[in-house]
Image (tube, rainbow, N blue to C red):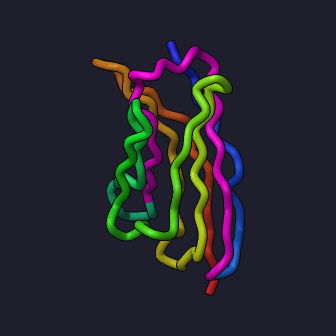
């Protein structure tokens, strides 16, 4: 069982930065896929970034070059550094751990970007 708690969300002006953190209560395995998703009002939840074993990362096209995902397995934590934020990045951001065959989700943290 893995429990995830996100932090670091908030209100920021366009062009600003935020760093999200996700702390896992259980032990994170190197084989776990860790990621961030987001959901804006009235829209479906979408992938933002994932990190797999071996430091392989994947990003949504909309955040490439602006967001960076990183993980610290020793601290059971995954991070999302968000730079050059845009109004359209406004959403609730969810941490995810996929450990076959189970998906674990955090409760979400709100990110609001003002123009």
Q: Nearer the viewer, residue 75 or 43?
A: 75
| Residue 52 coordinates in the image, percent (x, y) | 39, 35
Give above or below for 13 relative to 45.
Answer: below
Q: Which of the 4 quarters of the picture holds residue 15?
A: bottom right
Q: Residue at x 56, y 37 (%)?
A: 71
Does the magenta segment cover residue 22? yes
24 drawn magenta: yes
Q: Is residue 91 above or below residue 95?
A: below
* Residue in the image at 40% along x and 33% along y: 54
State the extent of the magenta-drawn residues as a range. 15-39
Give the x, y percent position of residue 38.
45, 54
Give the image location of residue 26, x and y in percent.
Answer: 59, 15
Is residue 82 visible in the rendered structure shown here? yes
Q: Residue at x 41, y 67 (%)?
A: 64
Q: Is residue 89 left or right of residue 42?
A: right
Residue 1 position (above or below residue 4): above
Q: Residue 4: x percent and y percent?
A: 58, 29
Relative to 58, say whether 40 is above or below. below
The answer to whether 94 appears left or right of 53 in the picture is right
> Looking at the image, which is closer to me, 88 or 53?
53
Q: Exactly how many numbered labels are in the figure?
A: 0
């Amino acid at each position: 069982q893995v429990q995830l708690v996100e932090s670091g969300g908030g209100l920021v002006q366009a062009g600003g930065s935020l760093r999200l953190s996700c702390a896992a209560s259980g032990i994170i395995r190197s084989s776990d896929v860790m990621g961030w998703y987001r959901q804006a009002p009235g829209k479906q939840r979408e992938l933002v970034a994932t990190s797999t074993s071996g430091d392989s990362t994947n990003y949504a096209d909309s955040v490439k070059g602006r967001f960076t995902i990183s993980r610290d397995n020793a601290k059971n934590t995954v991070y999302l550094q968000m730079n050059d934020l845009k109004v359209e990045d406004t959403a609730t951001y969810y941490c995810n751990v996929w450990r076959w065959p189970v998906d674990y989700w955090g409760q979400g943290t709100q990110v609001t970007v003002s123009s």
